[in-house]
Amino acid sequence: MTNVLELRGITKRFPGVIANENVDITLREGKILALLGENGAGKTTLMNILYGLYKPDEGHISVRGKQVEIHGPNDAIAQGIGMVHQHFMLVPVMTVTENVMLGIEPTKNGLFLDKEKVAKRIREISDQYGLEVDPHAYIKDLPVGIQQRVEIIKVLYRQADILILDEPTAVLTPQEVEGLFKIIDTLIKSGKSIIFITHKLKEVLAVADDITVLRLGKVVGSIDPKEATTEILASMMVGRDVSLVVEKQPAKTGEPVLVVENLLVRDERQHVTVRGVSFEVRKGEVLGVAGVQGNGQTELVYALTGLLPLEDGTIRLLGEPIRHTTPREILERGVAHIPEDRQRHGLILSFPIHDNMMLCTYYKNPFAKGISLQEKSIFSNAEELVKQYDVRTPNIYVNAGTLSGGNQQKVIVAREFSRPIELLIASQPTRGLDVGSIEYIHKQIIKKRDEGAGVLVVSSELDEILALSDRIAVMYKGQIMDILDADKASKEQLGLLMAGVQLSDKQKMK
Amino acid sequence: MSETATPSKTQTSKRSSLGQELLVPALAVVTGLIIGAIVIVASGANVFDAYGALFTGSFGSPVRLIEGLQVFFSTGETSELLRAIYPFTESLVTATPYIFAGLSVALGFRAGLFNIGAEGQFFIGALCSAFVGYSVKGLPMIIHLPLAILAGALGGAIWGMIPGYLKAKFGAHEVVNTIMMNWIAFRLSDWLLNGPMKASGFRPVTPNVLPTAELPRFFDDPLRFNLGFFLALAVAYLVYWFLFKTTTGFEVRSVGANPDAAKYAGMSIVKNLVLVMALAGGLAGMAGSAQVLGVDHWVGQGFSAGYGFDAIALALLGKSHPFGVVLSALLFGFLRSGATNMQSRAGIPIDIISIIQGLVIVFIAAPAIIRWIYRIRSIKTEETVLTRGWGK
């Protein structure tokens, strides 16, 4: 068996940091190589080098035994290397066909676009690899899982036989993940080779033929999936033993903190995205909201935190109704909010850490006297929180944008937890974070629960929902399908609910 | 990887980044002058004559300064000395409205707003100050002068607040609206100068402001150097204090840097947009006040030499920082005032200075060019958001 792709001794330095150091990677023909590593381990840099976006300082790349120079994506494509990005590179208002041909538009008579030719080729690819998709559908109308297929078709259309999939399962339901794995299987059977980048350990064990683990820019080791367990992989990634299970006592619930009845919310484009949602969160419990992204969870949280107005229904916070209530008033009633998009809502990346640490309470004692900001208190507050929450940063004066994702999230968690709270709303609290940070943030959330706060956790990661929740609500198309007790809920049940299938009594029993 | 990506000591990182901040603008100016020199040569003139005249026109001639000092020390006669420092003080006089107007645009940038309306606000400010200056009679200077300045600031503030309100309330883009407000201001001032505010005589100008409303001058004619310059410096410090040391300034900067996060943190975007546009208008209005009360003492057609538009460039050059604005306003003041001398002494058209200014702006706007020319390794800096997309 031949090695279709070899990276040898790749070193890439950025000012003050070595992103990749002497990295060796081998992809065998017709196999799946899982590239595993925490955020900031150097996976992305490595793939950018492979895709020609960065030039390595040392080392070389061989494709099918021949050493090659890759100066840009076009060179990579010419070598048969194709990349499916984590964030899809699709134009929503264009059709599948138009998106696929973008950049290499074939023409009729040298002038007119030959869409039919492309559509025909798309159908051939669809049939060959089991990638069902309508070439004339508009991207914006397609579910995320299908959009991902379009990305894969784009790569195949360009005749790639080495596919790089960057965190491909991050946005999929469990069922869609199954579908993707089937597609991957078909691709492998027809002779393609795949690099699968992820930080989800179970998926790695499910699909990979080879596993290479990166940590701090170096290859920690390669391991045969048959010999690996999630625990072994996690400790390879993090460099120490990590606990993947959140240890928690049964919840001691008190009276309701948050009561929501018949909530109706429109998003910024005036579409109704939350319809008739009712639930309550009690003191000392975690209510998990599961669901595939884009089923109204985002808008639900926005409505609860005052970022979107409620169209109809009632929200009661500690018995007081919330209607036309500003984010500040809600915050002052004791709500902490870890927002879904930390870079959009949670942080001002161009501001130093110390300013981000007081972003929501800058106008209050001790950070301000009158209108005058009190730098001393601002700095000492930040120093304290950085220490307490173990934010890895050279100092509190650097901009939040220079921190890694995990540390950015820790800044938000530190800030939100640093004031007395009755209700914690945590939306995708560990998205994109490494195992070490996930473990830490989960512990902090459970700690808040045990201190008596009500907790609402919204996550599209089922593992996270299962690990944290005492009860689980599943959202689908703006409605709550069902609310299950966490200790009785299975992944299969939740998966069905997430796909909009009502559970029969029999399914509920098991 | 970012854990180790940043320098480990605060002090070094702060200092080196400040050095970087200043290095690029400084090199941009130098490069602008070098290319300007090439243009001068291409037009068949002598670079040394031209830049010599530019220098003596903006700073004064060192030889004359020494002579002036000698005369002063031996006889106590000051006229020679005053003549020697005249160019330098004129540069400061020119810089004064630049400082105010530059602060206006910079404050807008900090809140993510593009105030193209400084020119119109400048006119309105000047007209309001002039009106109070000549029409209100019988007040002592200590009341009349502040009142006249306040009138200018208020007029400009209202002129700026209107687009701010339209943006906050209806989402109308401030670029469009401030441009519109400019035209209204221009035509309004034409009408006022030809009608209600016209002084007796043929020319469409206002009457002179009363001496009690004039910004005091430090020397006798022809030196026009006046209190306005120091007022500008004080206001620059005030803007700095407001932006960086107050809660409201923190809100303004947050709204500018990330409006979504500002909203999340409970800040009112609407309130801040209107506030910033009003303050920015007030600052541009004060530029007009300073010019009319300190220098011209009356307002005529074409009163502004494009201060409000140049202000956009110098706010960029000053990286929207009040102190940066002061430095770049001084640069513009010296260039402008030297250019007049260059034209009369070396026969180089004044437009050469516009070319140099334009080049400097290009280099500031695209610092990659300067980094490439001088092989400076870039440090990772946040992208400055000057204005947000249309209709947002």
Image (spheres, rainbow, N blue to C red):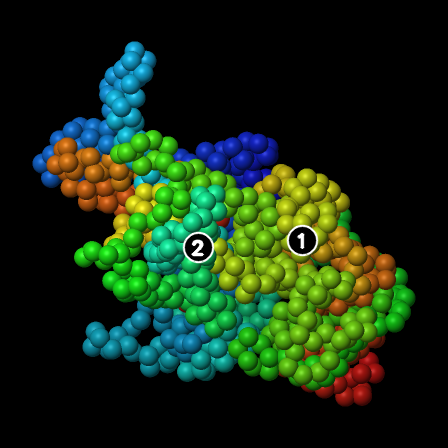
Q: Residues within 10 Å of mark 1 (few under 14, many from 20)?
A: many
Real-space CA distance between mark 2 and mark 1, rounded to the nearest whole angstrom: 31 Å
Looking at the image, is A176 positioned above or below residue A393?
below
Residue receiving disc 2: B151
Q: Position of residue A196 (x, y in %)?
A: 56, 60
Q: Residue at x 29, y 78 (%)?
A: A114
Q: Does residue A94 appear in the picture of this structure?
A: yes
Residue found 41% across the figure and 82% down from its top:
A136
Q: Nearer the viewer, residue A108 or B335?
A: B335
Label 2 lies in what chain? B
**Element class at badge 2:** helix
* The furthest residue to the left: B44
The residue under label 1 is A363
Number of callouts: 2
SS for dot 1: loop
Three-letter amino acid code of the residue under disc 2:
Ala
